[in-house]
Image (tube, grey):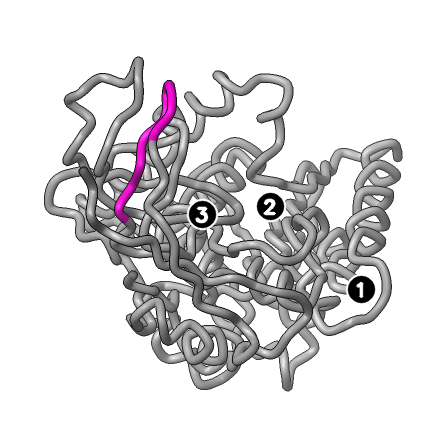
Amino acid sequence: MNTEGLVEVVLPGKVAPEGLRIRHGAVPTAGPGQVVIRVEATGVSFAEQQMRRGRYYDQPPFPFVPGYDLVGTVLATGEGVGPGLAGTRVAALVKVGGWASHVLVDAADTVEVPDGVGAAEAETLVVNGVTAWQMLHRKARVRAGQTILVHGVNGGVGSVLAELARVAGVKVIGTASARHHDALRERGVVPVDYRTEDVAARVRELAPGGVDAVFDHVGGRSVVDSWRLLAPGGTLVSYGTASTRDDEGSQQWPVIKLLGRVWLWNALPNRRRAYFYNVWAGRALAKNRFRARLRADLTQVFGALQHGDITARIAAQLPLTRVAEALRLAESGTVAGKVVLNP
């Protein structure tokens, strides 16, 4: 009998970080095809920052347990799951539910973490890593010798994007505040200060013929400028609406407008392409294909970490019970890397 207790963080509504609640309960039991994961590391992503404001476009109704991804050890397996999975360290992408000591997931949704990769290291690369990999290689299909623009290059997704691109022989221009520029130059990134510089003008100086791809999480006006900076044959990959995080009104409307722009641009007679990237795209219609792709791509990301091609950027590690502090830190814009929670 499992004598451990469940500890989880509940988001009760639109609250300040201090309004998050700690709830205790019984550890879930694995049903057919399921596993119970004892969580070793979860993290604070931009999605949770939007969710606490009610601004994430498809978040569940309040109250719920946030937590987009996690890494942990399989504690128990249900019927139909190979017993060899018990005791294995795995990663899982869950969208919600990760801020807990124990999480119940389908075994098919887990990805094994290689030996020698720590839980916190792996956690920084689950949603961030697979997002970066898929946008770079499945959407933009970058090639050596190309030039790309990465907005928020010092952020969770942006930093992985930049490293993966450099490994592929791609020149990276990235927007970031000035305090991060020296570190970015050391990693081979050409930095642009989005606070003090005219980003579009500066990028045109650096790439007079346009860039081959832009990765834009900002949305709003930024995505229009991003489209105009593309070279013939270039690709815009939009993957968020960060500029609307603190807005009021419908959380779906910014995404709907973005999708409308993407559709219109692709309908125009030009050689450029635009995508709105969603890591969950295709799961509802082709679950097995989605799982296979996630497993393949995250395995590639973990392999890149093992080979030293990318780094696990941990901004801070805090206990799950200090989640309010962790969320405040992640939202401050002062840290580089991911804030990791250790249940």
Q: Earlier in the sequence, mark 1 or mark 2?
A: 2
Nearest to the observer: residue 331 or residue 196: 331
In this picture, which residue range is highlighted in magenta? 30-38
| Position of residue 327 measured from the top left corner of the image (x, y, whole percent) | 48, 73
Q: Position of residue 232 (x, y in %)?
A: 71, 41
- Residue 235 relative to residue 92: left or right: right
Q: Assess whether mark 3 and mark 1 are in contact (beta carbons under 8 angstroms).
A: no
Which residue appears farthest toward the left when viewing the image? 116
The answer to whether mark 1 and mark 2 are in CB contact below 8 A is: no
The extreme top residue here reads 80
Asked if residue 196 is among those painted magenta in the image, a careful observer would answer: no
Mark 2 vs mark 3, foreground winner is 3
Quarter of the image where the N terminus is located: top left
Number of the front mark, 1 or 2: 1
Does residue 77 appear in this view?
A: yes
**Amino acid type, callout 2:** Asp
Among numbered discs 2 and 3, the one appearing first in the sequence: 3
Q: Amino acid at mark 1?
A: Arg
Image point (72%, 51%), residue name:
57
Residue 323, horizontal then vertical, whole percent: 42, 72
Q: Is residue 170 visible?
A: no
Choose the circle earlier in sequence order: 1 or 3.
3
- Disc number for residue 212: 2
Label 1 – label 2 distance at C-alpha: 20 Å
Say which of 108 and 175 sits in front: 108
> Which quadrant of the figure contains the C terminus?
bottom left
Mark linked to residue 221: 1
SS assignment at label 3? helix
Residue receiving disc 3: 127
User: How many neighbours does mark 3 have within 10 angstroms: few (below 14), some (14-19), or many (20 or more)?
Assistant: many
Q: CA distance from mark 2 to mark 3?
A: 24 Å
